[in-house]
Image: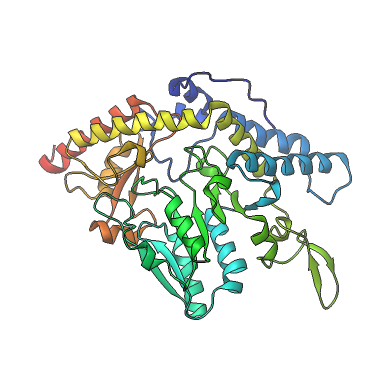
Amino acid sequence: MANLQRNTPTFDSAKIRNDFPILKRIINGKPLVYLDNAATSQKPQAVIDTLTTYYETTNANIHRGIYKISEEATAAYEEVRSIVANFIGAKEPENIIFTRNTTESINLIAYAWGRENIETGDEILLTEMEHHSNIVPWQILAEERQATIKYIPINEDGELDLSDLNTLINKKTRLVSFVHMSNVLGTINSTEEIIERAHQAGAIVVLDAAQSVPHMPINVTNLDCDFLAFSSHKMLGPTGIGVLYGKTATLQEMSPFLGGGEMIDEVHLQASTYKKAPWRYEAGTPNIADTIAFGTAIQYLENLGMDNVRAHEKELTTYALDSLTKIGARVFGPTNIEERGGVLSFWYQDIHPHDLATALDTDGIAVRAGHHCAQPLMNVLKVPATTRASLYIYTTKQDIDMLITSLMKAGKFFNNGT
């Protein structure tokens, strides 16, 4: 794993930027302003170096080899399981399953837990602010099992309306799955009341933490969720690696998701026996190199300190909210900075977000435009799409200023034709 020599006692996003080669790019004659971090983050040199070093020195399949580089690769891969467990406050490394992404993690739950526990007439509770990845797997399961999906509504401030929670969660509720931080609204949902009520009803709780784990301290033991899912690529790591945390007892009770090599104890012609969790859920050769590099990404964030990451984003989000409001943009989501993260979806001067994003790109500014895999939420907000700027550790106030300048230029062009 790469040696992270820099230790940052004070958070300096301008200095941090030097660790990210892609931020030196020039786009359309302008320096790249990358504001699409909710979709994927950029990678520091340390992560890139880890990938290169693995392929140059340690490339071998893991777990099965009894030669040196295979043993080295196995040790490095399994070390990341411990790194992840420590990072999110899991009790044991065995609580950590490696998947491809958050989507696959949620699908794993739907298949391995859902198909053994959801029956006709049962209810699944979601929220109106969910990403499609936390809707579609449950729709497939509900249709197959003849179960019912219900939704916690949101209020005008983009927060969950929990006034009817005791009715929504009842004796029929078997599973409650909701986003920890919205990828559209930036809303950081309060988990305690929902999780406590769900457990009182005998339901399990799944947290989609794709947007929260990269941006703030998380402790799954304190949260007391049954499952939690997130992705490497949104937190400085490579694509193709996801994490599913599960409580020990629940993981051990579930059947395998995929069958094949690595997840078995013994295979006979008519039957097989399986490894214990988490390995029974990791069939076949895994994404070894990217998993090892993911460990470096976590160490990079730990070196910064997740409290510092959160404090930096609160400061920048406050600045961005104020700046967008001053030019007349309608920003969706909470105004209380304690209740939101650095995701700012907005509507500006009735310019369609696709047109707006194209105009911003001419100034080297990368934002996301569309429904952000949250079409039901767009219907609630009564907009076809939004423009989304999302922040991270290397975002500066200068980036926000350049966004605002470009937005004002686009507004003048679309409204005046000049």
Q: Name the outermost residue toward the front.
A: 200
- Residue 294, image x and y in percent? 62, 40
Residue lying at 24% horizontally and 31% vertically, measured from the top left: 323
In the picture, measured across the screen, residue 275 lies left or right of residue 36, that is: right
Can I make out residue 375 in this image?
Answer: yes
| Quadrant of image for the C terminus | top left
Indicate whether 101 appears above or below 330: below
User: Which residue is more in the foreground, 129 or 54?
Assistant: 129
Indicate whether 25 appears above or below 253: above
Indicate whether 71 appears above or below 147: above
User: Which residue is more in the foreground, 20 or 101?
Assistant: 101
Residue lying at 70% horizontally and 50% vertically, measured from the top left: 94
- Residue 359, image x and y in percent? 27, 40
Residue lying at 24% horizontally and 32% vertically, measured from the top left: 322
Q: Name the outermost residue toward the left.
A: 416
Indicate whether 107 appears above or below 38: below
- Residue 358, image x and y in percent? 30, 43
In the picture, measured across the screen, residue 126 lies left or right of residue 118, that is: left
Count numbered badges in the picture. 0
Q: Quadrant of residue 417?
A: top left
